[in-house]
Amino acid sequence: MDTSKISFEISPSDQTCPLGVEVWLDQQQIFNTEHVADTVNVSHDIDENNAEHVLRVILKHKKTEHTTVDADGNITQDAVINVGSFEFEEIDINQIVQDLAIYTHDFNGSGNTTQSKFFGSMGCNGTLSLKFTTPVYLWLLEHM
Protein backbone atom coordinates (compact mmCIF):
# COMPACT_ATOMS: atom_id res chain seq x y z
CA MET A 1 0.00 0.00 0.00
CA ASP A 2 1.21 3.49 -0.85
CA THR A 3 1.86 6.05 1.87
CA SER A 4 2.27 9.81 2.11
CA LYS A 5 4.36 11.62 4.66
CA ILE A 6 3.10 14.46 6.80
CA SER A 7 5.68 16.46 8.71
CA PHE A 8 5.79 19.61 10.81
CA GLU A 9 7.82 21.31 13.53
CA ILE A 10 6.96 21.99 17.16
CA SER A 11 9.03 24.57 19.04
CA PRO A 12 8.77 26.36 22.39
CA SER A 13 8.89 30.12 22.82
CA ASP A 14 10.46 29.51 26.26
CA GLN A 15 12.69 26.45 26.50
CA THR A 16 12.60 26.46 30.31
CA CYS A 17 8.82 26.31 30.56
CA PRO A 18 7.66 22.67 30.81
CA LEU A 19 4.93 22.68 28.16
CA GLY A 20 3.98 19.23 26.93
CA VAL A 21 2.64 18.15 23.56
CA GLU A 22 0.85 15.10 22.21
CA VAL A 23 0.25 14.43 18.52
CA TRP A 24 -2.42 12.04 17.33
CA LEU A 25 -3.37 10.84 13.87
CA ASP A 26 -6.89 9.53 14.16
CA GLN A 27 -6.76 7.21 17.20
CA GLN A 28 -2.98 6.60 17.07
CA GLN A 29 -0.59 8.66 19.19
CA ILE A 30 2.47 9.45 17.08
CA PHE A 31 4.32 11.80 19.46
CA ASN A 32 4.27 12.59 23.18
CA THR A 33 6.54 14.64 25.39
CA GLU A 34 6.09 16.23 28.79
CA HIS A 35 8.48 19.11 27.98
CA VAL A 36 9.25 20.59 24.57
CA ALA A 37 12.71 21.98 25.24
CA ASP A 38 13.88 22.37 21.62
CA THR A 39 12.47 22.28 18.12
CA VAL A 40 11.08 18.85 17.31
CA ASN A 41 10.35 17.56 13.82
CA VAL A 42 7.30 15.28 13.79
CA SER A 43 6.96 13.05 10.75
CA HIS A 44 4.54 10.22 10.04
CA ASP A 45 3.59 8.04 7.09
CA ILE A 46 -0.11 7.83 6.28
CA ASP A 47 -1.69 5.00 4.31
CA GLU A 48 -3.10 6.29 1.03
CA ASN A 49 -6.45 4.55 1.43
CA ASN A 50 -9.70 6.37 0.66
CA ALA A 51 -10.36 7.67 4.17
CA GLU A 52 -10.98 10.71 6.33
CA HIS A 53 -8.32 11.58 8.90
CA VAL A 54 -7.82 14.00 11.77
CA LEU A 55 -4.40 15.25 12.87
CA ARG A 56 -4.53 16.60 16.43
CA VAL A 57 -1.80 18.52 18.25
CA ILE A 58 -2.55 18.86 21.96
CA LEU A 59 -0.87 21.41 24.24
CA LYS A 60 -0.76 20.39 27.89
CA HIS A 61 0.70 21.65 31.20
CA LYS A 62 0.21 25.39 30.50
CA LYS A 63 -0.27 27.25 33.80
CA THR A 64 -1.17 30.81 34.77
CA GLU A 65 2.39 31.51 35.93
CA HIS A 66 3.67 30.85 32.37
CA THR A 67 2.15 34.20 31.34
CA THR A 68 3.28 37.61 32.60
CA VAL A 69 0.67 40.38 32.62
CA ASP A 70 1.32 44.06 33.39
CA ALA A 71 -0.83 46.32 35.61
CA ASP A 72 -3.05 47.21 32.64
CA GLY A 73 -3.81 43.58 31.85
CA ASN A 74 -1.53 43.40 28.81
CA ILE A 75 0.45 40.21 28.23
CA THR A 76 4.13 41.12 28.34
CA GLN A 77 5.56 37.61 28.16
CA ASP A 78 3.96 34.27 27.36
CA ALA A 79 5.14 30.71 26.93
CA VAL A 80 3.62 29.21 23.79
CA ILE A 81 4.20 26.28 21.50
CA ASN A 82 4.76 27.18 17.86
CA VAL A 83 3.59 24.64 15.30
CA GLY A 84 4.60 25.18 11.69
CA SER A 85 6.49 24.07 8.60
CA PHE A 86 3.61 21.74 7.70
CA GLU A 87 4.28 19.57 4.68
CA PHE A 88 2.65 16.70 2.84
CA GLU A 89 5.23 14.89 0.72
CA GLU A 90 7.53 17.94 0.97
CA ILE A 91 4.78 20.25 -0.31
CA ASP A 92 4.29 23.30 1.93
CA ILE A 93 0.74 23.29 3.32
CA ASN A 94 1.08 26.05 5.94
CA GLN A 95 -1.52 28.25 4.25
CA ILE A 96 -3.96 25.34 4.02
CA VAL A 97 -3.44 24.63 7.72
CA GLN A 98 -4.16 28.27 8.58
CA ASP A 99 -7.30 28.15 6.43
CA LEU A 100 -8.69 24.82 7.68
CA ALA A 101 -7.29 23.97 11.12
CA ILE A 102 -9.37 24.62 14.24
CA TYR A 103 -7.83 25.49 17.63
CA THR A 104 -10.12 24.51 20.52
CA HIS A 105 -9.36 25.67 24.06
CA ASP A 106 -10.92 27.18 27.19
CA PHE A 107 -8.31 29.82 28.06
CA ASN A 108 -6.71 27.35 30.51
CA GLY A 109 -9.95 26.99 32.44
CA SER A 110 -10.63 30.72 32.76
CA GLY A 111 -13.23 31.00 30.01
CA ASN A 112 -15.75 29.21 27.88
CA THR A 113 -14.57 26.65 25.35
CA THR A 114 -13.86 28.42 22.09
CA GLN A 115 -12.90 27.37 18.58
CA SER A 116 -10.78 29.68 16.48
CA LYS A 117 -8.53 29.73 13.46
CA PHE A 118 -4.96 28.66 13.98
CA PHE A 119 -2.21 31.19 13.31
CA GLY A 120 0.91 29.22 14.19
CA SER A 121 1.07 29.19 17.98
CA MET A 122 -0.77 27.53 20.84
CA GLY A 123 -0.88 29.62 24.02
CA CYS A 124 -3.56 27.72 25.95
CA ASN A 125 -4.02 24.08 26.80
CA GLY A 126 -6.11 22.81 23.94
CA THR A 127 -6.25 20.98 20.65
CA LEU A 128 -5.31 21.96 17.12
CA SER A 129 -7.29 19.80 14.68
CA LEU A 130 -6.78 19.40 10.95
CA LYS A 131 -9.17 17.20 8.99
CA PHE A 132 -8.00 15.83 5.66
CA THR A 133 -8.64 12.92 3.33
CA THR A 134 -6.52 10.43 1.49
CA PRO A 135 -5.34 10.10 -1.17
CA VAL A 136 -3.51 13.24 -0.10
CA TYR A 137 -2.84 14.53 -3.61
CA LEU A 138 -6.61 14.79 -4.26
CA TRP A 139 -7.11 16.64 -0.97
CA LEU A 140 -4.27 19.01 -1.90
CA LEU A 141 -5.82 19.70 -5.30
CA GLU A 142 -9.12 20.60 -3.62
CA HIS A 143 -7.50 23.02 -1.17
CA MET A 144 -4.64 24.71 -3.03
Image (cartoon, helix red, strand yellow):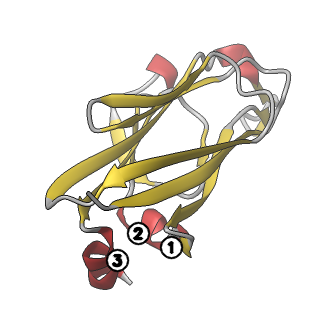
Q: Earlier in the sequence, mark 2 or mark 3?
A: 2
Q: Secondary structure at mark 2?
A: helix
Name the residue nearer the viewer: 115 or 141: 141
From this view, report whether residue 134 is shown above or below residue 141: above
Three-letter amino acid code at the position of disc 3: Leu
From this view, report whether residue 18 is shown above or below residue 114: above
Residue 106 in picture, x, y percent from top left: 41, 28
Q: For mark 1, what is the residue?
A: 95
Name the residue nearer the viewer: 28 or 38: 28
- What residue lies at 85% left-to-right and 21% top-to-bottom? 16
Per the model, the C-alpha gap separating discs 2 and 3 is 13 Å
**Image quadrant assignment for residue 119:** bottom right
Mark 1 surroundings within 10 Å by alpha-carbon count, few (fewer than 14), some (14 through 19), many (20 or more): few
Q: For mark 2, what is the residue?
A: 99
Question: Which label belongs to residue 5?
Answer: none
Residue ranking furthest to the front:
1
Q: For mark 3, what is the residue?
A: 140
From this view, report whether residue 55 is shown above or below residue 135: above
Of labels 3 and 1, the one closer to you: 3
Of labels 2 and 3, the one closer to you: 3
From this view, report whether residue 128 is shown above or below residue 35: below
Residue 39 in picture, x, y percent from top left: 76, 41
Q: Quadrant of the C terminus?
A: bottom left
Q: Secondary structure at mark 1?
A: helix
Q: Secondary structure at mark 3?
A: helix
Mark 2 surroundings within 10 Å by alpha-carbon count, few (fewer than 14), some (14 through 19), many (20 or more): some
Three-letter amino acid code at the position of disc 1: Gln
- What residue lies at 55% left-to-right and 54% top-to-bottom? 7
Name the residue nearer the viewer: 138 or 119: 138
